[in-house]
Amino acid sequence: MKCSNCGSSSIETDISKGTVYCISCGTVHEENSVVSSLNFTETSNGSSVLTGQIIKITENYTKVGTSFISTNNTYVQNTIRSICVSLGLSDDHVSSSFRWYKLSLQHNLTKGRSLLYTLSAVIYITCRQEKTPHLLIDFSVLLRIDVFKIGRTFLKITNLLNIKVPLIDPSLYLPRFVNKLKMSEKVLCLANRIVSRMKRDWIVVGRRPNNLCGASLVVAGRILDEVRGISEVARIVHVSVVTIKKRLKEMAATASANLSINEFCNLWLEKEEDPPVNKEEKIDLTINTPEELSEEKEYKLKKFEDFAEKIKPIENKENINLRKEKDLGESYNGYLEENKENINLRKEKNSMESYNGYLEENKENINLRKEKNSMEKDKEFLDENKENINPN
């Protein structure tokens, strides 16, 4: 046997380690060699037993006797490969993700979690390290699982294993979103320049890349007459319309927003803007002199007077309505006091008329009731004086 590297025939075999290597150059030709011959030993009762164990070609050599672990690893690797194929990832991403999974398994980070969340997290770690344009929401949509649980699993694995993942560059995702929105290469170039300007103005820090891409594509599309609605862009980049409007508002507060289209495309401002958070919390300390204080006071007073003039017709209208209601109530009370006797007489008259009408309607019934009562009284009288009355 000759060495494939140097051509030397000085090949040594180390039986204890199971390796075959070249003495001249040190190239290892075989390692973890498996004995193909069968040896039998005799037991105490005279029977023969096979020495060692038979290893199948599909099993993991380091997990001999634990076929369940081998089967589980095969299932996990196939699941990772299926997810990677759906996301357009290569076999290198599959092997790298599987290594992260085995490392998580050794540190008991997979216990108490669904397998899909763990696999999504380790594949996303690989995507971040390889700088591929994939988001957590892609795994959520593909596997129909909760995106926030994927994020929590990702953070736990990276923190406990001390994995350093690079920061996300929003420009990685622009070609993907441009393709989905069916926009041109000019829009892509201009959107990349807008994102670079946003990095310079500290708008990128603390923001998710998809909403930054959405805002830059909205602006670039309007500049190059490839207009896409904010709602359409928000649906493609998986953010809300309100979020994109906030990013547009932050862009409008920078010095770059005051440039023309040609100036923005050809000039590059060296000045950096303050982060949006600092702009919101910044305290205005420019008013120092008494003259400036008096001017501000006059401005606020004028603003208050203008506001008072606007609401004055509304207040007058309400007062007029209240006054009308009050006058109407007072006049009605005065009328009642003046005609109190007439009203009482009218009430008595109405009650008498209604009573007389009732008597007229029920006259026959009343007469019958009277006759009945008189007959009952006569009957009672006869019953009481029955003994005293002498029959003729």
Image: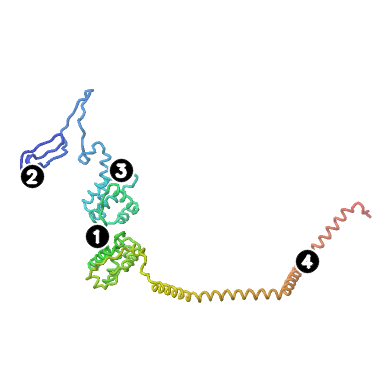
Mark pair 1, 3: CA separation: 33 Å
Q: Which mark is residue 5?
A: 2
Q: Position of residue 131 (x, y in %)?
A: 23, 56
Q: Secondary structure at mark 2?
A: loop
Mark pair 1, 4: CA separation: 105 Å
> Which image quadrant is residue 62 in?
top left
Q: Is residue 199 visible?
A: yes
Q: Which mark is residue 29?
A: none
Give the residue type that dot 2 points to.
Asn
Q: Is residue 334 above or below residue 376?
A: below
Give the residue type that dot 1 points to.
Leu
> Which image quadrant is residue 5 in?
top left
**Looking at the image, is mark 1 or mark 3 earlier in the sequence?**
3
**Looking at the image, is mark 4 or mark 3 earlier in the sequence?**
3
Residue neighbourhood size for the residue with mark 2, other residues' Cα within 10 Å, grouped as few (<14), some (14–19), many (≥20): few
Relative placement, left or right, of 11 versus 175 is left
Q: Which residue corresponds to mark 4?
A: 364
Q: Position of residue 45 (x, y in %)?
A: 23, 23
Name the residue rendered at 63%, 73% in the picture: 329
Q: Is residue 298 above or below residue 79?
A: below
Residue neighbourhood size for the residue with mark 3, other residues' Cα within 10 Å, grouped as few (<14), some (14–19), many (≥20): few
Q: Which residue corresponds to mark 1?
A: 172
Q: Is residue 104 above or below residue 38?
A: below
Give the residue type that dot 4 points to.
Glu
Nearer the camera: disc 4 or disc 3: 3
